[in-house]
Amino acid sequence: MITWMQKHKKYLVVTIWVSTIAFVGAGFVGWGAYDMNTNRAKSVAKVGDRSISIGEFQQKYGTMYEYYVNASNGKFSQEQAEQMGLDKIVLQRLIQDNIMLNYADELGLSVSDEEIILALMVDPSFLIDGKFDKAKYENALKQARITPKDYEHNLANTLLLDKLFNALRVDANSKDFDMLAASYFMQDRVSIQIINEDKSSIKVDENELKSIWEKNKDKYLTKTKYTLKSKFIPKVASDENLTALKEYYEENRAEYRDGFDKILSFEAAKDRVKDDYDMRQTRKLALSQYLKAKKGEVELEFDIVALDGDYGFDFEELKNAQVGDYIKPFKYRVDYKDGYLISKLESKELPTPMAYENAKEFIIDDYIDNKLSKNLEAKAKSALNNFNGTDIGFVARDTRPVIKGLSENEVSEFVNLIFANSAKDGYVILGNKAVVYKILDQKLVTAKELSGYENLLRNSALSIKNEQLIEDLLSSLQHRYKIEQYYKGQ
């Protein structure tokens, strides 16, 4: 197909855009309980006339794994993926996709080679100077361990689903618009009464504290304690090699920005570049020392005791480490000096119930918060029955009125909560305050006020309506096509 495209690309007109399937290096899922029947060894499931290949499953798994890694700022691990059953979630989504693909086949929809080629030609991941580059395409697939045939097959499925959803798409009408406008832009005229409760007024009963501790010892635990034998590698002060620094800057220039998010010049960023470059050189040295320490060629020098949550440690790694394991070098600071720490786990003390005296400060906090909440609720219920509020006028979801006695954050939370509740009266607990309220009247904003939100509302109505349509269709198709699941999970 690529050969054909290269020969005929001057005749092609770019008419569509399709997202690139993410290329990731996430650890692939293990095969666990997998049906190894030779007739099904290449697939994880079959839906109707379509098989879901192992490659499709691995690629989708890698994409979703990378999504969670990015969403958690790199803290998502393979262990967490297993705990949440990511493999089963991926398989279920692929099954749902293939239910819809079978339906597209049944309707006679298809994707031509030309459509696949057009999609590839406009994919920014494969362009150089605005033109499709075959070498870049092939290298990207090679790095991702995906064959062109598999990639283009998956791309065809993506395009076919897009074609199906576009064919099923329904427009939003004026009633949909009006209903959404009423939901988003209804204004409530509210009367409120603020009740305050002072923590200092709550008396602590020692007997009650001890009773709470006795009943909840497993709640008040010590932190896991790690004792590590360590060696600190201080930051290397490298010679100022301008060529090396400029090369490092070019590799990482997107990281050096000013307060307006503009990339700094090398001269403006030079000090930061030097510092980062030195830390990279330090890491290389630390890795070398780490490998020597594992061989017994470098002696670790001092002990460090770390508790869960202490700054500077990767506790996910410590949690999974066994006594005697070496911890890979990580950034650390000793006596105001930056560098890397090499460590060996000497001992690990798991959490145990705290003695009463040690747990007391935590119990008191919970005790006071609980008493405070109960007192506020009792006063709020009483005030609601004998309401004496102040009319604050009309408020909407997106308004944040100035309310005497409430901070901006409290006002925001209060407004969000009353619009999330369908009741005409009630109360909201905000820390050491309760806001008792009654809705006196309601109105819609004027057509003029709505005009600025018309496109947003129509697009939202369109999205909601079509998402519900697809959800209902999928539900009705669940039993239309035979589903055979070979992969049973880890």
Image (cartoon, rainbow, N blue to C red):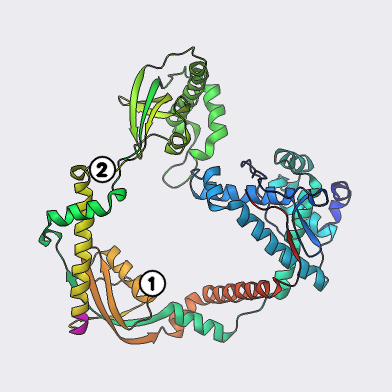
Q: Position of residue 291 (x, y in %)?
A: 52, 19
Up-down relation of residue 46 to residue 287 (above or below): below
**Helix, strand or loop at mark 1:** loop
Up-down relation of residue 149 to residue 189 (above or below): above
- Judging by the rendered image, the residue that carries numbered circle 2 is 354
> On residue 398, which mark appears?
1
Q: Position of residue 490 (x, y in %)?
A: 62, 48
Residue at position x 30%, y 44% in the image: 221
In the rendered image, residue 45 lying in the magenta stretch gets the answer no
Magenta span main SS: helix
**Helix, strand or loop at mark 2:** loop
Up-down relation of residue 186 to residue 195 (above or below): below
On the question of residue 404 being in view, the answer is: no
On the question of residue 474 being in view, the answer is: yes
- N-terminal of the two: label 1 or label 2? 2
Report the mark closest to the observer, 1 or 2: 2
Q: Position of residue 301 (x, y in %)?
A: 37, 16
- What range of the chain is rendered magenta? 383-387
Residue at position x 38%, y 22% in the image: 229
Marks 1/2: CA distance? 46 Å
Q: Is residue 358 left or right of residue 444?
A: left
Q: Position of residue 192 (x, y in %)?
A: 23, 78
| Closer to the camera in the image, 135 or 152 | 152
| Closer to the camera in the image, 145 or 350 | 350
Q: Which residue type carries mark 1? A: Asp
| Closer to the camera in the image, 134 or 175 | 175
